[in-house]
Image (cartoon, helix red, strand yellow):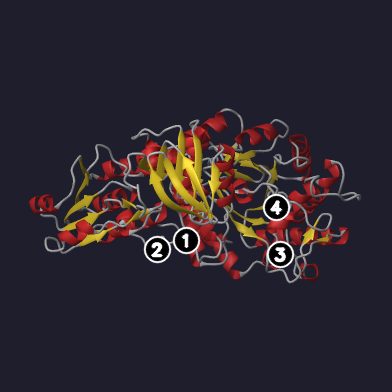
Amino acid sequence: MKLFEPIKVGPMTFKNRIYHLPLGEPGHRSQTALNYYSARAEGGVAALTTGGIANMEILRHPTKELKRFAQTIHDTADDCYVGTQSLAIYGPEKIDKRPLTPSGGWSPATEQSISADWPDPRPVEISVEEMHQYTAWLAEAAYNQREAGFDFMELHATHAYIWRQFLSPMDNHREDEYGGPIENRVRWMTETVEAIRKSVGDDFGITFRLAAMEPEHNGISLGDSSRAAQLLEEAGVDALIISEGANSHNRGFISSCVPLMISFDRNCFAHWAGAIKKVVDIPVIAVGRITQPAEAEEILQSGQADIIGLARALMADPEWANKAQVGLAETIIPCLGCNTCFDYSQGYDHMTCAVNARLCYEEQTEYGPAEKARKIMIAGSGPAGMEAARIAAERGHEVTLYERESRLGGLLYAAAAGEGKDDVDDFRKYLETGMERAGVKIELETEVNAELVTEVKPDAVVLAIGAKPRGLNVLGIEGDNVVPAETAITGEVPVGQKVLVIGGGMVGLETAELLSNQGKAVDLVARSELARDFSMFNKPAMLDKVAMAGVMTHEFTTIEEITPEGASVTIDGKPRFFKVDTIVLAIGYDADKELADSLKEQVADIHVIGDANGHDRFREAIIEGHEVGRNL
């Protein structure tokens, strides 16, 4: 595979074409972050970059923790290069505690990116003198980073950061030598690269993250970025990381910076890398929801890029590179692109992952062989049940998983329905493959009950049987025209042409979008505001998709009565009747612990996990399944 061919990147020779992109937590801050990066270095990446560092003092004067970081990575994998990412935003004084922009005042990109931590958030125009000071600081920082043991520095000029603002004619209205034509707009960056190169010589790498274009009107054009790429190469950049620009004109701002499953296809920015690769001779790194080794290989073979940049895929599976190299791609934990990791990086102690229970808890979640092999009965094949079964079997237990349906997966089939949800089905296949490789015995079309438990005589029972759809206490709820969302999504029951979806959470919104895209006329009602169970970052993207699908949404609605002709509701105190063919219920699920209660006299060791325990998100189900599996 070309993915595992060496490649020269400036003074470095990468052992393969896998580059770990920077993440949110700066690598110098904690032992947890150090453990994380060490696992990925050991997992086979050729190079990795710490999380973005905006504090210029830390860049200029590396702390002992940052030095320890570089040394630890090199000790872990001496063939893995390590770099820091500079966001180039702030200086020590922060210019009288106020943010800086190319032209002063609010701009489309800066308004959303400014933190409430600023004592005075009104942006000021950065002066030429201040720009030159930043350039000098970065040159000093690069020299000291090299002395601290780092191999390269990554410079960032995408998303809402100030260098992207300089590149964008939407934000840069300067009339001096740093505004106007692209040669001027990229000047500060090329001057900085030249200063860094003068400071460190040719034995220290410089990579540069560049926005190929901005989808907004009057943003960065491909012509702009192509010329900027050529000038950056001339200035001394060793490799270009090509992304897409984003700013707050787009309500899905974060979902376009960190491409979201429901908004972007896999490999969504690779074509931009291919466009830039045509105009430069240095290596080009492709990014953007690249999750599968076969797809990464296709990007390389097609000439769109020289190197593959991964971040979330490596969070999902630290062994991504090693597994791909030995032909075990089917055992790679697939990233969903759901941005759970990003959500939890904002205001939580650590990042977390919907599909990898061990992320940032590598030491606490280690497991080995069980002291004594036991007979384990697992009921239910949703993510919690399959994860528990795999882990328990890997530890040496005799595990049998029982599923009452004719196929494995539980509600994963419903979750995988609709546009852009292929990753969920990949995850289901991964879980099934994991159980098969671990030796889990599967019994389909078999419902666990007291009689079966008496017959099997297990040492422990794990109940992952799912939850019961929540009902409504209204007249007509039992009507033939009322169906649960999961059966409407999968097509198990027919849905008429006119549809009313009840429920404004994730399931309701995704169901409404799916049905509308099938050509149905869909109204959605919610008792409160829409998308309350979405994060602040994913919510705008979901609402945009629902609106684009043509779904009519109604908040603060009370269901009064359901009839064969439709539903009577009250919206903001005003009565209304929806005449529809089908009413779809998407108002949540209730934990189902009845079976657990009935088995207490038969089995002492009973565990209820997943939806059955009220945990209806992938992250909770996987964490719970993993925990039970390693503690049985």
Using the image as rendered, state which of residue 260 and residue 567 is in the foreground: 567
- Between disc 2 and disc 1, whose residue precedes? 1
Q: Which residue is mark 3?
A: 56
Q: Residue placed at 45% from the left, 50% from the top?
A: 503
Measure the C-alpha gap from mark 3 to mark 4: 18 Å
Count of labels in the image: 4
Which is closer to the viewer, label 1 or label 4? 4
Using the image as rendered, state which of residue 291 and residue 591 is in the foreground: 591
Q: Which residue is mark 2?
A: 363
212 over 353 or under it: above or below: above
Measure the C-alpha gap from mark 2 to mark 4: 35 Å
Residue type, mark 2 in image: Glu
For the residues labelled 2 and 4, say whether their Cβ atoms are less than 8 Å apart: no
202 over 133 or under it: above or below: above
Measure the C-alpha gap from mark 1 to mark 4: 29 Å
- Between disc 2 and disc 4, whose residue precedes? 4
Using the image as rendered, state which of residue 9 and residue 264 is in the foreground: 264
- Between disc 2 and disc 3, whose residue precedes? 3
Residue 355 visible at all: no
Which is closer to the viewer, label 2 or label 4? 4
Residue type, mark 1 in image: Asn
Residue 379 visible at all: yes
421 over 395 or under it: above or below: above
Is 234 placed left or right of 497 in the picture?
right
Q: Which residue is mark 1?
A: 35
The dot on residue 160 is 4
For the residues labelled 1 and 4, say whether their Cβ atoms are less than 8 Å apart: no
Residue type, mark 3 in image: Met
The residue carrying pointer 3 sits among few (fewer than 14), some (14 to 19) or many (20 or more) residues within 10 Å by Cα, namely: many
- Outermost residue on the left side: it is 455
